[in-house]
Amino acid sequence: MTHFLASVRNAAEAERVLAAGADIVDLKEPDEGALGAVAPSVIRDCLRTIGGRKPVSATVGDLPMNPAAVAEAVAATAELGVDTVKLGIAAEGDPWGCFDALRSLSAPADLVLVFFADVPSDVDPTEAAKASGACGVMLDTAGKGRGSLTDHMTLDEIGRFVDRARQAELQVGLAGSLRAHHVLPLLALRPDVIGFRGALCEQGARGFNLDPKACAEIGRLVAAGRTAPEARFEARPTSAVCSISSARPGELGGGEEETGAQNGTKIGTCEHGERHRRALDRIFVHDYVLEVEIGVHHNEKGVTQRVRFSVDIDIASDPTTLDDDIDRTLDYDYVINGIKAIISGGHINLVETLAEDVAQHCISHPRAERVEVMIEKLDKDPGAVGVQIVRSKQET
Ligand SMILES: O=C[C@H](O)COP(=O)(O)O
């Protein structure tokens, strides 16, 4: 199961993220850099407040790779009683000297090495963990104004990082200016930890106060999403048939589709772009009907009504490297699990809001270029009413 790590700067914030369902409280001063350290007195205070309810990690600051300084900082932080100490691997200095020094420490806390996706490093994470005695590795970003983790690495690359750590029997975490729309695609990679600060704060700014609504929203998404990837191995929803049917070459704009036995959900793929090395293909989920709590009217509150989702996503693909591999395209489950996670959040007033959330989820997939979302309420008299929106990567 993936654990929700929330970075906080004091005990009051720790209480707030615990209320939002955080599994790991990560002590960090956001104004002091990507891995800014909080003062020892603040760590003690937080440990008292948390009182063992959840594991606590702490960072040691953005330190240069100086063996003596790194070993001293890790040992001092571990002595305060945290469960895990997180150490960022900087580009310059003597990382291997640091790993040697750490290995000979007998610090009373686990060590996690943090690698920055936006800082090139030739240190191999699993080798570094072995050399230092770390029990885990994590990806994060150093430059918090320079995009999120997925702006610096593709999902395939992040997946390989997770897999390599797994093979080395290491715990693995993912973070780096992650937002709500990153939750599902990253949970699908099955990391042990997914970490947030900025997304939990007012205006999404990591140095600002925590926003209780944002904390709750991220907590809810992680809780809902970490079960969603399992759906790949579970029975499909009765309303959907999810078999793949690809267009044959030459069927521009055509394509094949399969129709659900229960209510006619259609899911498929059709090629509609030019057939060069990098084609534009269209993945679609049509006529997917779910019960949703939605509407502004009094008689729409506290009840569900049938809503039909039709989603078309244009994806960049390279047919020469597809290799019959689901990870090299966009899985229909990504769309379906996203819709399910969005509607599990409770009542939504407007179909426009629902359409926008679905569109943002879809367009955030690294392969998605353009998405069309149609949402229809089916139980309104006299017929279907709804909204259709189009969003492109360039607009987001
Ligand atoms: O360890 C997780 C980090 O605190 C993530 O911070 P961020 O979401 O602001 O990049």
Image (cartoon, rainbow, N blue to C red):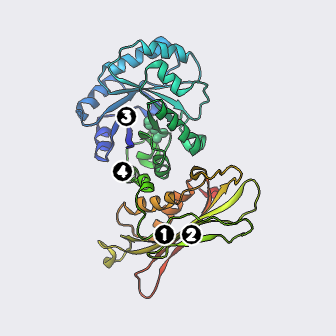
Instruction: Give the mark nearest the N terminus, 2 or 3.
Output: 3
Q: Do the residues labelled 2 and 1 touch (CB within 8 Å)?
A: yes
Q: Which mark is residue 70?
A: none
Q: Which of marks 2 and 1 is nearer the N terminus?
A: 1
Q: Is mark 3 within 8 Å of ligand 1?
A: yes
Q: Residue 148, can we see it?
A: no
Report whether 91 appears left or right of 292.
Answer: right
Q: Can you give x and y, in whole percent of width and height, for residue 306 in the image?
A: 40, 75
Rendered-image quarter of ligand 1: top left
Q: Mark 3 points at which residue?
A: 26
Q: Spatial distance from mark 2 to mark 4, Cα to Cα?
A: 28 Å
Q: Does dot 2 land on a helix, a strand or a loop? A: strand
Residue at left offset 41%, top offset 83%: 380
Specify which label sits upstream in the sequence, 2 or 4. 4
Q: How far apart are marks 2 and 1 (CA)?
A: 8 Å
**Numbered circle sitting on residue 389:** 2
Looking at the rendered structure, the kind of residue marked 4 is: Ala
Mark 4 Cα within 10 Å, few/some/many (few <14, many 20+)?
some
Please tell me in which quadrant of the rendered image residue 194 appears: top left
Residue 223 numbered mark, or none: 4
Residue that label 1 marks: 352
Of the image marks 1 and 3, the number of the one nearer the N terminus: 3
The location of residue 250, given as percent across then percent down, is 75, 68
Q: What element carries label 3?
A: strand
Q: Relative to the observer, which residue lies in front, 26 or 233?
A: 233
- As measured in the structure, the alpha-carbon distance from the residue carrying label 2 to the one carrying label 3 is 39 Å
Amino acid type at circle 2 is: Ile
